[in-house]
Image (tube, helix red, strand yellow):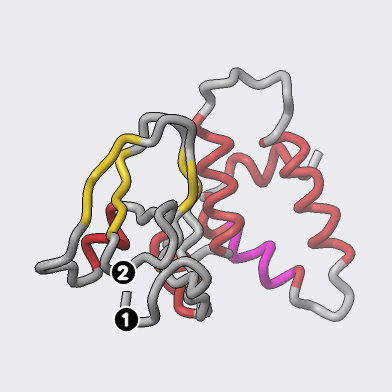
Amino acid sequence: MMAALLLRRDKKSTAAHLKADLNRTDNSSGVHQLQELLDSVLNPERPAGDTEALEWCKCLLAGGEEFEEFCKTVRSYDNATLCGLVWTANFVAYRCRTCGISPCMSLCAECFNNGDHTGHDFNMFRSQAGGACDCGDNNVMRDSG
């Protein structure tokens, strides 16, 4: 079985090899190898706390590069102006009444700290039911916010 052989190899070099195979015009071999590897790595019979599966997935996504570098590259393509971070109950967030058009406007801590709210009327709060960051949403925030 090909998966057993791939699992014994170095994750980064295996991921780079698969990326090269999948970029070929006839990529059927790479598709087959990747499918076998994923079937093995993501086998539901493996223990739930198995970090090996996560490491494999990170290496495969990054195509053999360092995962952190891959993430930086992906982020560089993000030209979205909205944050959109979604949070659950008990998340600490901010409201800036100076920047907000709506009294329900909320900001995650990262967006709040990245903005200049010196002299603004703001408060920090603990979300009771969850919410989402409105940073960049001109429907609820002033353009200057």
Residue 21 position, x and y percent, is 74, 69
Name the secondary structure under disc 2.
loop
Q: Earlier in the sequence, mark 2 or mark 1?
A: 2
Q: Are marks 2 and 1 in contact (CB under 8 Å)?
A: yes
At 89% from the left edge and 64% from the top edge, which residue is drawn? 28
Position of 14 with respect to 97 (left or right) is right
At 51% from the left edge and 80% from the top edge, which residue is drawn? 79
Quarter that holds the C terminus: bottom left
For the residues labelled 2 and 1, the Cα–Cα distance comes to: 7 Å
Residue 23 position, x and y percent, is 75, 76
Residue 99 belongs to the span the image colors magenta: no
Q: Which residue is mark 2?
A: 99
At 57% from the left edge and 45% from the top edge, which residue is drawn? 56
In front: 68, or 39? 68
Residue 135 position, x and y percent, is 41, 65
Mark 1, other Cα within 10 Å: few <14 / some 14–19 / many ≥20: few
- Residues shaded magenta: 14-21
At 81% from the left edge and 48% from the top edge, which residue is drawn? 35
Q: Which residue is mark 1?
A: 144
Position of 3 with respect to 106 (left or right) is right
